[in-house]
Amino acid sequence: MRLALLALIAEQPRHGYDLMTEIETRSGGAYRPSAGSVYPKMQQLEDEGLITSSKGDGKNVYTSTDDGHAEVDRERETIEQIWRRAEEWRDWGPSFHPASMEISRHVEKFAKSAFSAVTRGGVDPDVVRQIIDRAQGEIDQSQIV
């Protein structure tokens, strides 16, 4: 979290809400840090001399210092890994939508049935694969409508 926040501030001055929103955007909605996790890190970064804060439009705006930019440069590889990981989560973001959560129990039961059919029921995995492919095809077709 520390490096992600520092990297975002090094890109441009930001306020806390903007930082939370940007992390949520980069993770495709899969993760949105809370104020309780962001603001203590901001204080830590300020205490370390890596950022400064000033009031702007009634909000604290954080700006990277020269030392902050230097740390971002030193940690570039790690920061790139953080954003790659966030990008991987992007595809999962919609899975956390309340409407998706409504069907999660059914998806879990479906998966258990498929696994059980193959491992305990002696059903040919190709048969189960065909059923899954048909179900997926029906779902994909319903999205077109």
Image: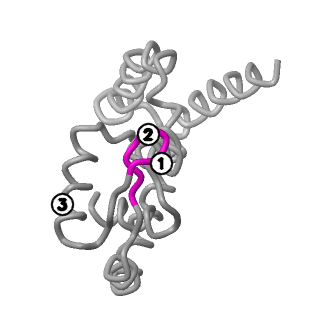
Secondary structure type for disc 3? helix
- Residue 60 in the magenta stretch? The answer is yes
Instruction: Please name the residue shown 22% across and 38% down the image.
Output: 36
Disc 1 packing (10 Å; few <14; some 14–19; many ≥20): many
Residue 30, labelled with which disc?
Answer: 2
- Residue 125 in the magenta stretch? The answer is no
- For marks 2 and 3 on the same chain, the one whose residue lies earlier in the sequence: 2
Secondary structure type for disc 2? loop
Q: Nearer the viewer, mark 1 or mark 3?
A: 3
144 relative to 48, above or below:
above
Task: Estimate the spatial distance between the alpha carbons at disc 2 and disc 3, rounded to whole Å.
Answer: 25 Å
Instruction: Please name the residue shown 55% across and 33% down the image.
Output: 127
| Amino acid found under the numbered disc labelled 1 | Ser
In terms of secondary structure, what is the magenta stretch mainly?
Answer: strand
Q: Which of marks 2 and 3 is in front?
A: 3
In front here: 61 or 96?
Answer: 61
Q: Residue beneath label 3, please?
A: 44
Image quarter of the N terminus: bottom left
In front here: 137 or 70?
Answer: 70
Q: Evaluate if marks 1 and 2 touch, with contact meaning CB atoms under 8 Å apart.
A: yes
Q: Evaluate if marks 2 and 3 touch, with contact meaning CB atoms under 8 Å apart.
A: no
Instruction: Please name the residue shown 23% across and 73% down the image.
Output: 49
Residue 27, labelled with which disc?
Answer: 1
x, y (%) of residue 100?
A: 49, 21
The magenta segment is: 55-62
* Relative to 75, 18 lies left or right: right
x, y (%) of residue 44?
A: 18, 60
